[in-house]
Structures are given as structure tokens and as C-alpha cells.
Image (spheres, helix red, strand yellow):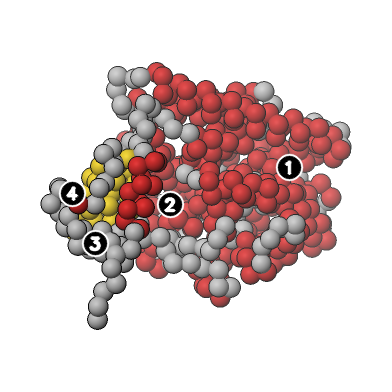
């Protein structure tokens, strides 16, 4: 049968819709959505019911790189700088030293257990060494898992920033095997150059991007997402061309933009969240299509060994060593160890050896694919139970959604903030006009129970009301002080 563009588009639409519907199943039955995306891709593949034959590793690598660029950027953009700032040092330790330790431990055991050569073992260890941003973000956010203290931002910071180290190690050891690099020691100056250029380019492009978005004043609002897409791709391409780490540059770009203010920021964050989900679906479907179950079955035993070493030895050792100088409790370190999900990144990196044609490349790919399936299935599904067992879970943030949106723009010294009226507030029982609200503070909306009230001067305030207030920092603090004043004690 001739494959037409209509048939290709039909399959893309069907598989995408199936993946979106699968995300609903994921929430209901506590199965990670990314695992379902992979399974759908495998079912649609040549050995599944779909019968789609796909073995183009070069195309898969290209799709994976493009997808990762936008997933990593979105992860940085959606990260609150205030929450990750105190965690920069432990996060960077995990994303660099931790990845290196994991790669070495897995690599050495691969040499002993699988009879790989030294370089082949270290290459396999490097490929599976990083936690996957797409997997971690998806599990921690889509499954509404909340963790105590700094755990959640630490895990998101680590997963968003450790892919560059895994990419560097993989390319480095692959270069030694193919004789592009002379020795392991040759990698040290390359590492400094790779990471240094990535950091600098990411920071510079963030400054340029924010200034450009704010000053370009486009006539059509729909062009702003297009502009950010161009800036993201430009950041990666320029950095990679300068022999820097493009993934690190893109993550820093997103992280720095998250702390800045620019036109249409709220809508752009939402747009890139959607793009990140689309890229995750596309990437995992592609990797599912790329897998041949008949080739994976022979490496199940080897895959189980490597997965066990990775989950129960390499990851815990790297986490406990890296967090040794920092004040994390034993249960918190165990939790960080357990949320070491492997996802699409290792599978994409496993296509690199295939494209060079080195010995054991097909075996490495099949083992890595099985390890990823095992990691997402075992760790991804058990995170809620493990967090409860370790007592590091916390109540979910059920912040109310308001029927009003506010976009911070340049030249406006105000923000939209919700303030709660305490249950012992002296303002309760009074009219809004009677509590001396600062002249430049505007109570836009009152949330009371399950309903919303558009207030006026005669609206009577009740205990537990949530004011949605538009004001600058000074007036917000003044109003907060007014609401905090205690009322007369109530007689029983």
C-alpha cells in the first residue's frame, strides 16, 4: 500500500488522541502517562497491532533532540527561581557529580556482569546516568504528588539540569571508542568548555530574549509564541555551534526567563507547557515505534540486572555522597534516590552508538530501553506510596482558580494577589468602605466558599473571605495589616 501524506497525518492524529486519552487513565489508575505513551507507540509498531515499520534511528535522534529542547526549556520556565535558589549547590552537585558517580557505578558493574569492555561499560553507564526531566516533571506534576520542604524543587532542578552531563559523558566515551578523543583525561578540558559555554550562552540569551520580547511590540499577540520558539532554537543552535552544551543553555534560558518579567508571560508559560506535553507525546511515541519487543526479550535478564544496580545501588550511592554536606534527613535522601526516573533521554542517547555502528550498540539500545521501562514502571508508580512510607509527603496545593487573569506588564507597579480574612479579624462584619483600604489598592473579587462576589463599598466582609487585590507591594502590606488586626473577643 502506498503511504500518502493523508495516511501519515491520520496516524499522527490517532496516536496523539490515544495518548491524550491515556493521560486520563494515568491519573485514575496511578500509571505514569509516559509509560502509556511508550506502550501505545509499541502497539502501533511493526510488531504490534498497528504494523507501522519504523527503524530510522537518525530520525528518532533528531525528533528526540528537538523534543528535549522544548521540554527542558519549559521545565526551566515553569520553575520558580525563589524556590530553587537555596538549592543551587545541592542541585548542581546531583546534576554533575551525581551523574558521574552513577555512570561509573553502572559502568563497572556492566563490565563484571555483562562482560562488556571498559569503554563499552562506561558508555552504557553514561547513557542511563541522568534522571529524565520529562519523566520527573510529568510524574511530580500530572499525578499531583506533593513533597515536603525543598524536595520537589530539588528534584525538578536536578532533572532539568542533569541531562547535559549525561549527554557530555555519552559523547565523550563514544568519541574515545571511535578514536575521536585520545583518552579519558582529554574529556576534562572539554567538560569545562562544554558547560561553561552553555551557562554563559543561556544567561546572555535570557537577557537578550527578555529585552527583545518587551521592546519589539508586535502587532499580533499570536506572534509572541513564535518569537519565543525562534529564540529557544537560536539559543540551542548557537551554543552547540560554539561547542557548548545546548541543552544546558536552553535550561538556563528558561530558568532566567522565569525570574524576569516580560510581555504576555502568563500566556507564554501556558503555551510552552502545552508544547512540552506535545513533545513528550511525540518523543515517547517515536521511541515506542522504534522498539522491537522480539529484540528486547533476549536482554531481559541483563536489563533487570542493570536496572537493579541503577535503582538500588548507583542512584542511592550518588545521592547520599552528593547530599552529604547538606542538611537533608535520611528519609529525604532516600526519597531523592527513589525519584531517579529514567525516561526518553537514555533511549535517545542509546541511538548515538547505533549511528556510529560500534560493537554492542544494538545490545546497549535494547538494554537501555528495558531499563527505562522498568524504572518508569517500578519507581514511577510507587512514588506516592514511598513518599507516605517515608513521611515526606505533604498536603496537595489546592489553590483556587479565579475567573480573572492578570498579566504583569512593564510600567505597571502592581500585582494581583489573594489575601485571606483571618477568622479573628476585626474587619469581619464590617463593610468594605469602613475598613480604610489604601486608596490605590483595589479589591477586584471576593471568593466566599464556592462562589465569587464582585464587591462594592457596601459589601459586608466575612471571616474566611479571600480578597483578590490589585495593588503594589506597599499597599498590599498595608491592607494585610488591616485585615490582621484582631477583633473583639466573641462571647459564648
Towards the viewer: 298 or 382: 382
Q: Which residue is mark 3?
A: 428
Left or right: 123 in relation to 307: right
10 Å crowding of disc 3: few (<14), some (14-19), many (20+): many
In this figure, which residue is indicated by the disc labeled 2?
A: 44
Towards the viewer: 456 or 52: 456
Q: Position of residue 262 (x, y in %)?
A: 42, 30
Element under label 2?
Answer: helix
Nearer-N-terminus badge (2/4): 2
Q: Is residue 189 positioned above or below 350 on the image?
A: above
Q: Classify the position of the N terminus by image quarter.
A: top left
Front of the two marks 1 and 3: 3
Residue 433 numbered tag? 4
First in residue order: circle 1 vs circle 3: 1
Query: Which residue is drawn at the image coordinates 86% and 38% (left, top)?
Result: 185
Callout 4 secondary element: helix
Q: Is residue 357 visible?
A: no
The answer to whether the residue labelled 2 contacts the one labelled 4, judged by CB atoms less than 8 Å apart, is no
Give the distance between the C-alpha atoms of the residues marked 4 and 3, in whole angstroms: 12 Å
Of callouts 4 and 1, which one flags the residue occurring earlier in the amino acid sequence? 1
Q: Residue at x 29, y 72 (%)?
A: 489
- Sequence-earlier tag: 3 or 2: 2
Q: Tell us which disc is closer to us: 2 or 4.
A: 4
In this rendering, position of residue 476 left or right of residue 177: left
Residue 169's mark?
Answer: 1
Disc 3/disc 2 C-alpha distance (Å): 61 Å
Q: Earlier in the sequence, mark 1 or mark 2?
A: 2
| Element under disc 1 | helix
Which residue extends farthest left?
A: 458
**Which of the 4 quarters of the picture holds residue 176?**
top right
Residue 127 is left or right of residue 478, and the answer is right
Amino acid at each position: 500500500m502506498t503511504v500518502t501524506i493523508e495516511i501519515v497525518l491520520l496516524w499522527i492524529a490517532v496516536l496523539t488522541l490515544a495518548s491524550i486519552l491515556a493521560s486520563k487513565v494515568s491519573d485514575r489508575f496511578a500509571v505514569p502517562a509516559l509509560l502509556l505513551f511508550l506502550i501505545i507507540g509499541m502497539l502501533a509498531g511493526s510488531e504490534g497491532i498497528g504494523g507501522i515499520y519504523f527503524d530510522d534511528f537518525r530520525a528518532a535522534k533528531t525528533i528526540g533532540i528537538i523534543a528535549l529542547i522544548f521540554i527542558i526549556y519549559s521545565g526551566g520556565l515553569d520553575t520558580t527561581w525563589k524556590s530553587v535558589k537555596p538549592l543551587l549547590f545541592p542541585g548542581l552537585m546531583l546534576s554533575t557529580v551525581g551523574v558521574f558517580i552513577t555512570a561509573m557505578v553502572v559502568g563497572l558493574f556492566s563490565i563484571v556482569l555483562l562482560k562488556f569492555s571498559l569503554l563499552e561499560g562506561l558508555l552504557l553507564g553514561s547513557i542511563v546516568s541522568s534522571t529524565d526531566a520529562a519523566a520527573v516533571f510529568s510524574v511530580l506534576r500530572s499525578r499531583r504528588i506533593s513533597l515536603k520542604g525543598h524536595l520537589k524543587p530539588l528534584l525538578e532542578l536536578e532533572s532539568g539540569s542533569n541531562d547535559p552531563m549525561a549527554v557530555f559523558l555519552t559523547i565523550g566515551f563514544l568519541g574515545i571508542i571511535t578514536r575521536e578523543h585520545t583518552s579519558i583525561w582529554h574529556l576534562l578540558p572539554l567538560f569545562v568548555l562544554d558547560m561553561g559555554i552553555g551557562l554563559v550562552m543561556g544567561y546572555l540569551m535570557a537577557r537578550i530574549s527578555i529585552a527583545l520580547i518587551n521592546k519589539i511590540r508586535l502587532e499580533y499577540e499570536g506572534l509572541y509564541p513564535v518569537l519565543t520558539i525562534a529564540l529557544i532554537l537560536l539559543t540551542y543552535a548557537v551554543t552547540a555551534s560554539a561547542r557548548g552544551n545546548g541543552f544546558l543553555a536552553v535550561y538556563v534560558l528558561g530558568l532566567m526567563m522565569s525570574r524576569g518579567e516580560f510581555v504576555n508571560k502568563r500566556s507564554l508559560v501556558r503555551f510552552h507547557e502545552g508544547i512540552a506535553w506535545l513533545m513528550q507525546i511525540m518523543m515517547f511515541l517515536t521511541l515506542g515505534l522504534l522498539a522491537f519487543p522480539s529484540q528486547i526479550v533476549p536482554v531481559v535478564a541483563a536489563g533487570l540486572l542493570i536496572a537493579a544496580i541503577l535503582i538500588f545501588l548507583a542512584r542511592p550511592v550518588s545521592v547520599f555522597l552528593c547530599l552529604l554536606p547538606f542538611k537533608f534527613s535520611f528519609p529525604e535522601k532516600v526519597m531523592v534516590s527513589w525519584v531517579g526516573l529514567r525516561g526518553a533521554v537514555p533511549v535517545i542517547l542509546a541511538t548515538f552508538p547505533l549511528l556510529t555502528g560500534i560493537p554492542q550498540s544494538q545490545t546497549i539500545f535494547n538494554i537501555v530501553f528495558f531499563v527505562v521501562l522498568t524504572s518508569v514502571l517500578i519507581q514511577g508508580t510507587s512514588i506516592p506510596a514511598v513518599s507516605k512510607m517515608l513521611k515526606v509527603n505533604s498536603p496537595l496545593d489546592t489553590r483556587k482558580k479565579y475567573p480573572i487573569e492578570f498579566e504583569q506588564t512593564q510600567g505597571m507597579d502592581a500585582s494581583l494577589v489573594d489575601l485571606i480574612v483571618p477568622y479573628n479579624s476585626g474587619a469581619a462584619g464590617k463593610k468594605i468602605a469602613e475598613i480604610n483600604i489604601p486608596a490605590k489598592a483595589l479589591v477586584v473579587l471576593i471568593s466566599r466558599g464556592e462562589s465569587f462576589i464582585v464587591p462594592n463599598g457596601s459589601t459586608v466582609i466575612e471571616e474566611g473571605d479571600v480578597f483578590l487585590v490589585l495593588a503594589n507591594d506597599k499597599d498590599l502590606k498595608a491592607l494585610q495589616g488591616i485585615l490582621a488586626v484582631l477583633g473583639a473577643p466573641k462571647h459564648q
